[in-house]
Image (tube, rainbow, N blue to C red):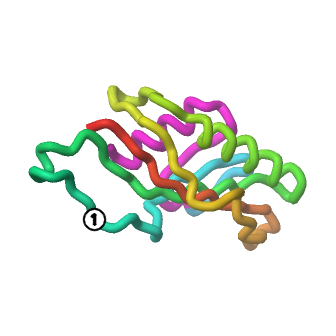
Amino acid sequence: MMLEDVRDYIASLGKSDHTYMGKLDHKKECSIGVYHSKHSNGFKTALGGPSQESYGIKSVTFLIHWNKSPRETEKASKELYEALRDTREANTNNKTIKFIQLLYNEPIDVGTDDNGIYEMVIDAAIVYEK
């Protein structure tokens, strides 16, 4: 599974006006960014080697870049968090996301950007079918 597959799944949820991956210099309000996570699960492989693996794990961070209202930003972040938590057997780009393991109990407030836009992040492990 590639980062673009995760981005496309997030876009399909309809939780934001804009969904992107990687760095964008001019982030638009009401956007969700999908990034490779700095958090990583340790290396694991199935008994018998990689050919026996039935699933893979992709560590990602979601950046909710919303607007100048902390209340609206938190609400949008919570809605995305709940949608991620409830994901089961979701198909995107001919791949199946088995479920999404959230790493924290709620979205994390990271303050505002240089323009005063409130942001929150959600760290997760995407468990997908191989």
Placement of 89 over or under 116, stated as above or below: above
Residue shown at 26% from the left, 60% from the top? 44
Q: Quadrant of the N terminus?
A: top left
Where residue 39 sits in the image (x, y, percent)? 46, 69
Judging depth in this view, the residue of 18 and 96 nearest the camera is 96
- Going by the numbered disc 1, the residue's amino acid type is Phe
For the magenta stretch, what is the residue range?
Answer: 1-24
Residue at image coords 52%, 55%: 124
At label 1, counting other C-alpha atoms closer than 10 Å, the crowd grade (few under 14, some 14-19, many 20 or more) is few
Position of residue 60 in the picture relative to residue 44 (left or right):
right
Q: Position of residue 29 (x, y in %)?
A: 74, 50
Q: Position of residue 57 (x, y in %)?
A: 36, 51
For residue 16: magenta? yes
Residue that numbered label 1 is attached to? 43
- In depth, the one of 75 and 31 nearer the eye is 75
Quadrant where the C terminus lies?
top left
Q: Is residue 112 left or right of residue 25?
A: right
In-front residue for pair 28/58: 58
Which SS class for mark 1? loop
Query: What is the total number of numbered labels drawn onto the structure image?
Result: 1
63 on left or right of 125:
right
Residue 13 on the magenta segment: yes
Q: Residue at x 41, y 66 (%)?
A: 40
Q: Is residue 47 above or below residue 86?
A: below
Where residue 109 appears, x then y in whole percent? Answer: 75, 66
In the displayed structure, 98 sits above or below 48; it is above
